[in-house]
Amino acid sequence: MTKQHNVHANISIGIAVLIIGFFQFGCNQSSSLPKGEVNILNKEPDTTLASHKQYDIEVYKSFFIYGDGYFIKHYHKEKGILLGYTGIIGDSTEFNKAAYHWINDTSVSVKLYNSASKRERVFKLSGYELRNSLETFD
């Protein structure tokens, strides 16, 4: 091996170690954004903005056009104003809990689950500038 080839190999190894280090550091950082668990309600909760604060999450079961479903309300601030967004999942499964963690200021990951049967559904809700989206992962 030539001396120049050894230098290039050492640089490549060094860069790879730095990249791996950055990934490990980034993945192991604990988020300061809220996470938690809520009970799923059987009726619509109070939806007035005055009764909520940033990062509140509420989940309730209700009937909608296509059958049974779960309504997930999430609240966050945009430009200093608290806004509420709603996502709807159609599902007749009996879920009794919802675990959540905020991914960033406008998106939250939610897992609906039944603590007895271990059935679950996972999805991501996002809301920004009066538009919202829901992405399922099952």
Image: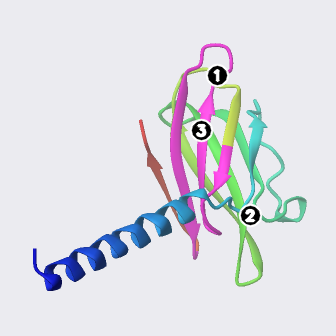
The picture quadrant where one finds residue 83 is: bottom right
Seen from the viewer's position, the closer of residues 32 and 83 is: 32
Residue at the spot 54% in from the left edge and 59% down from the top edge: 27
Q: Which element type, helix, strand or loop, lies under badge 3?
A: strand
Quarter in which the N terminus is drawn = bottom left
Position in image of residue 121 (x %, y %): 52, 33
Residue type indicated by callout 1: Asn
- According to the picture, the residue beneath numbered tag 2 turns out to be 32
Residue at the spot 15% in from the left edge and 85% down from the top edge: 4
Q: Is residue 92 left or right of residue 19?
A: right
Over which residues does the magenta segment extend? Answer: 100-129
Residue 111, numbered label? 3
The answer to the question of whether label 1 and label 2 lie on touching residues, with beta carbons closer than 8 A, is no
Quarter in which the C terminus is drawn = top left
Q: Marks 1 and 2: which is nearer the front?
A: 2
Q: Is residue 48 left or right of residue 95?
A: right
Residue type indicated by callout 3: Lys
Residue 114, numbered label? 1
Residue at the spot 79% in from the left edge and 65% down from the top edge: 54
Q: Residue furthest right?
A: 51
The answer to the question of whether label 1 and label 3 lie on touching residues, with beta carbons closer than 8 A, is no
The picture quadrant where one finds residue 112 is: top right
Residue type indicated by callout 2: Ser
Q: Residue furthest left?
A: 1
Residue 18 vs 41, above or below: the answer is below
Question: Which badge, 1 or 2, comes first in the chain's sequence?
Answer: 2
Q: Is residue 95 magenta?
A: no
Q: Disc 1 to disc 2, how far (Cα)? A: 27 Å
